[in-house]
Amino acid sequence: MSDTDQHIPDASPVADANYLLANRTEMSMLAHPLFVQSIVLQTHPIRFLVGALRRAIMLREPVCFSAPSGFGKSYGLVMASKELKRMFPDTTIFLHVVNNKHVPSIRSFFKHFLHTVGITDLKGETSDLRVRLMNRLIDAGRASTLKAVVLLIDETQGMGLEDFQFLKDIGNHMDKVNLRLVVAMMGQEPDFSVTLSELRKEGRLDIISRLTLRRLTFPGLTTQDHIRDVLEMIDTEVFPQGSSITWPQYFGPKAWDSGFRIANQLEPLCSALCARLPGNSLSGGVPARQLFLAIRRFMLELADIDASGAPMPSDIWDQCVEYALIEDAAAITAERMDISHGRTTF
């Protein structure tokens, strides 16, 4: 059969599953949402974040969240931004990512912020940039039914005193014209606590009371129910979009037809996780980054096993969790927290 005679599925609403599964390659697997990380599942931590941000916006009050590295904070904030724009369609919601290294000048700081709010005209003196940014936020606030602008800030552990002062100044200026700047911050621990401690040492209780008084912990996946929730969502997501092929089915079509569901892997997965987490427990939180790495590794193993017809190893989740370096990540987080607690006072 020539290439032109091969049956290639068109862009119909339901894709040809047999063709897609038979022609799956390493490159096509790399386009899967699990590997490009283009879809953020509505996990317990993300639902918590969206709910807390919704309340903050409706009450027009600032809020900040923090968690250790790897807990999915940045992905959560991106997902929350999308959900909030759906909930508040006429309210401008900006997502600003702080440079981890302080910008070299106040001028660069304003340029970075102007880029966030969609302004490309970066010419003029620093005072011009400041006015341009202020006017953009005021215009956005006036166009909103809430008479507010929402600013979601990621990596806030990298903020300096001048950054906090600028946010306070903007908030004060908007208050004068009967508008509200709602600031929600996401920071990495233990660095975020150190940053706030420095504000206290500088005597800037005005900034703390204005912007960071309400502190919430961005929760990790801390129970079997949270992990089950993730696995059940993976069992129902489809790829390619418009097809009926579930994520596990894409990697293991024979196993799927025989009744395999990744949700049924809950016990061996949690057992492998607990064996490598502090206190042999999920209660301290499973880093989302490492968890999904373990799941991706499992899917690759499933594809090879499904193609070869070999039995699934009894220790497959031990191998996948070990590969994800969950134990190492947890140890580094604990060490950093210990160091921080040794030099930070509240």
Image (spheres, rainbow, N blue to C red):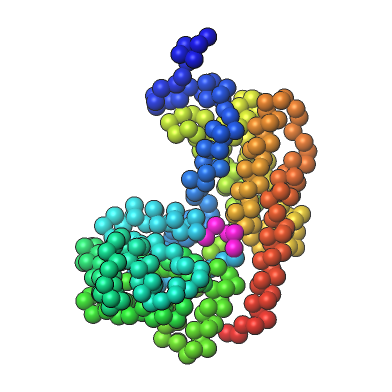
The magenta segment: 69-73
Q: Position of residue 74 (x, y in %)?
A: 50, 59
What secondary structure characterizes most of the magenta part? Answer: loop
Q: Is residue 159 above or below residue 236?
A: below
Please tell me which residue is depicted at 26% across the width and 57% down the height of the picture. Answer: 90
Q: Position of residue 123 (x, y in %)?
A: 27, 68
Q: Position of residue 184 (x, y in %)?
A: 42, 68
Q: Is residue 135 left or right of residue 263?
A: left
Q: Is residue 250 left or right of residue 62?
A: right
Please tell me which residue is depicted at 41% across the width and 80% down the height of the picture. Answer: 162
Residue 210 in sight in this render: no
Q: Quadrant of residue 165?
A: bottom left
Q: Quadrant of the C terminus?
A: bottom right
Q: Is residue 10 left or right of residue 279?
A: left
Q: Is residue 159 left or right of residue 334?
A: left
Check if residue 70 falls in the magenta segment.
yes
Please tell me which residue is depicted at 62% across the width and 35% down the height of the picture. Answer: 261
Q: Is residue 253 above or below residue 165?
A: above
Q: Residue furthest top?
A: 1
Q: Residue furthest bottom?
A: 203
Q: Position of residue 224 (x, y in %)?
A: 65, 52
Q: Quadrant of residue 58?
A: bottom left
Front one among 159 and 275: 159
Q: Is residue 137 above or below residue 193?
A: above
Front one among 260 and 98: 98
